[in-house]
Image (cartoon, grey):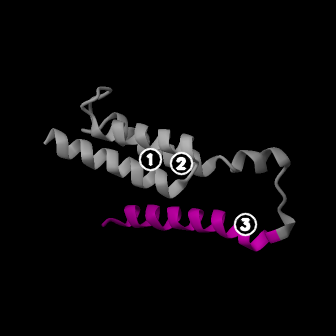
């Protein structure tokens, strides 16, 4: 590893640490406006969607697969349907996994 790469890694570490530590150090003195509080409620959903959707829509990593042959897509649709109907997180996860693995087993 060259000195330049090491400097880059140390710099990125310092910036990341300082940004995160600022919220702890400033504590109550840092107040977000109400609009920011409302927007921050959607961050977990947005991050989870950004992680999952490429895997669901591009299972091989390169080509769109929007057909019923895509077990990932069927599992995600099953999960969404169960979550919408029953509003129960554990049931949604278990149902989506069941749809995914059952379809994979049936299709070989």
Q: Which quadrant holds the N terminus?
A: bottom left
- Seen in the picture, residue 14 relative to 94 is either above or below; the reply is below
Which residue has dot 2 on it?
Answer: 47
Magenta region, residue range: 1-27
The residue to which callout 1 is attached is 51
Residue visible at 49% across and 58% down in the picture: 90
Instruction: Name the N-terminal-most of marks 3 and 2.
Output: 3
For the residue pair 54 and 89, the one nearer the viewer reads as: 89
Residue that badge 3 annotates: 23
- In the image, what residue occupies the spot 33% across and 45% down? 99
Image coordinates of residue 29 in percent, x first then y, are 86, 66
SS for tag 2?
helix
Principal SS element in the magenta part?
helix
Distance from label 3 to label 1 (Cα)?
25 Å
Residue at screen point 21% across, 44% down: 104
The alpha-carbon separation of the residues under discs 3 and 2 comes to 20 Å
Judging from the image, what secondary structure is the residue with disc 3 in?
Answer: helix
Count of numbered tags: 3
Does 40 sit left or right of 95 as displayed?
A: right
């Amino acid at each position: 590893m060259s000195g330049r790469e090491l400097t880059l890694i140390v710099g990125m570490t310092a910036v990341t640490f300082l940004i995160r530590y600022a919220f702890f150090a400033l504590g109550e003195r840092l107040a977000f406006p109400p609009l920011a509080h409302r927007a921050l409620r959607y961050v977990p959903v947005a991050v989870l969607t950004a992680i999952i959707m490429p895997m669901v829509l591009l299972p091989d990593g390169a080509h769109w697969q929007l057909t019923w042959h895509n077990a990932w897509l069927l599992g995600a649709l099953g999960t969404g349907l169960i979550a919408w109907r029953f509003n129960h997180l554990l049931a949604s996860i278990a149902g989506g996994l069941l749809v995914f693995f059952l379809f994979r087993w049936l299709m070989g």
